[in-house]
Image: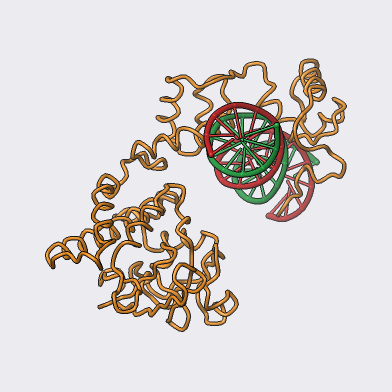
Chain colours: A orange, B green, C red
Amino acid sequence: MGRSPCCDENGLKKGPWTPEEDEKLVDHIKKHGQGSWRALPKLAGLNRCGKSCRLRWTNYLRPDIKRGKFSQDEEQTILHLHSIHGNKWSAIATHLPGRTDNEIKNFWNTHLKKKLIQMGFDPMTHQPITDFFASLPQLMALANLREPMEHHPLDEHAMGLQAEALQLAKLQYLQCLLQSAASLIPSANSYDQNGITDLEVLNLLNSIPPIKENPVLNSSELENQGSYHFGNATSQPLHHPSLLSQLSAPQVPFSYQPSLNTEMGQAPFLTTILSQGDRNPSDSSWVLPSPTLAPQAATETSISNPGDASSITSSYGGVTSWPELLFEGPIMHDIS
DNA sequence: AAGCCGCGCAACCGCCTGTTT
DNA sequence: AAAACAGGCGGTTGCGCGGCT
């Protein structure tokens, strides 16, 4: 049963509060206390909805609100409490007198989250991000070595090492991405012994809105094929029980930009690494030489106009493969 | 000086839960 | 038991401001 928002009434003011409105609200609450928020606006002579009044009071006008920068102690407290409660801002706020949940939430989103990421911690789990990040500089260096490959071919051994490093980077990234994705899933009670289930990861990925359409198929065509359209968060059962088989399964269509995981700021790294490696010299296509990730994949991809993402086309009857979910531009082939 | 861009924060929105009718 | 109400919560948005080019 739904309810209409309390602010649906016509003519009620929205937006920033004026000093006059603040004064009316404070005066009223000083005189009558916090009664019914729904009735308050009328009684106080405010052309606002009760919800707006409550928010203004609790987040800004309340006399016991502590304003100004968060102290080092408060910061530590928030970090600690967040590791326990997660994004339960009101629960965290109860331990910080004078601070509102809204203020803490804003502080977290604008400062602490970034800080944790910079320090190499996952802001959701508070755990160190995998070794992949620690080894990024080396991996990047290795990847960059391949750039002038055509002009200065490396010997076979070096090439092999680099290929391994690149492949490892991809796998580690993928693992990290999935772990991070899983950590965002609220229903922890269904975790299996390995931490997460394939289904959960796929559900999370399903919940990510599509950014661009597959250049070959539009969504209606995909639906006509009985396929999953990522972003619509369908509850259709999966055809395959295994995540990995899903990743490589041709019936999973999607096409995303790498920004899907921008919260962690990882995609650019990945794009760089992959864009430097594993190019098929014969046709300039890109290769994902991973029998683990794509045992059945046989996507043929062509780029008619290099540099133009819209010119990328893929086979599987136009259904793109898993790697494109993660990476814009470079399209991977299975070479097994 | 003007325009652009990123950041911080107040406010809104939609959903959820507990209470009342 | 069901519907309506009220308040609370977390996520998101949009505006203002300051720094940079």
Along the line of sight, the residue nearer the viewer: A280 or A91:
A280
The residue under the point 33% across, 75% down is: A333
Image: A9 above or below A89: below
The residue under the point 80% across, 15% down is: A31
Along the line of sight, the residue nearer the viewer: A256 or A104:
A256
Image quarter where the N terminus of chain A lies is bottom right
Q: Left or right: where does residue A163 sit relative to residue A274?
A: left
Along the line of sight, the residue nearer the viewer: A203 or A137:
A137
Image: A217 above or below A11: below
Can residue A105 be seen by looking at this rendering?
Answer: no
The residue under the point 53% across, 25% down is: A94
Q: Position of residue A92 (x, y in %)?
A: 50, 30
Q: Position of residue A307 (x, y in %)?
A: 46, 67
Image: A212 above or below B5: below
When asked about the image quadrant of residue A327, the answer is: bottom left
Q: Residue furthest bottom?
A: A317
Q: Position of residue C8 (x, y in %)?
A: 63, 34
Can residue A258 be seen by looking at this rendering?
Answer: yes
Total number of numbered discs in the rendering: 0
Image quarter where the C terminus of chain A lies is bottom left
Q: Left or right: where does residue B15 sit relative to residue A107?
A: right
When asked about the image quadrant of residue A202, the answer is: bottom left
Q: Position of residue A10 (x, y in %)?
A: 86, 45
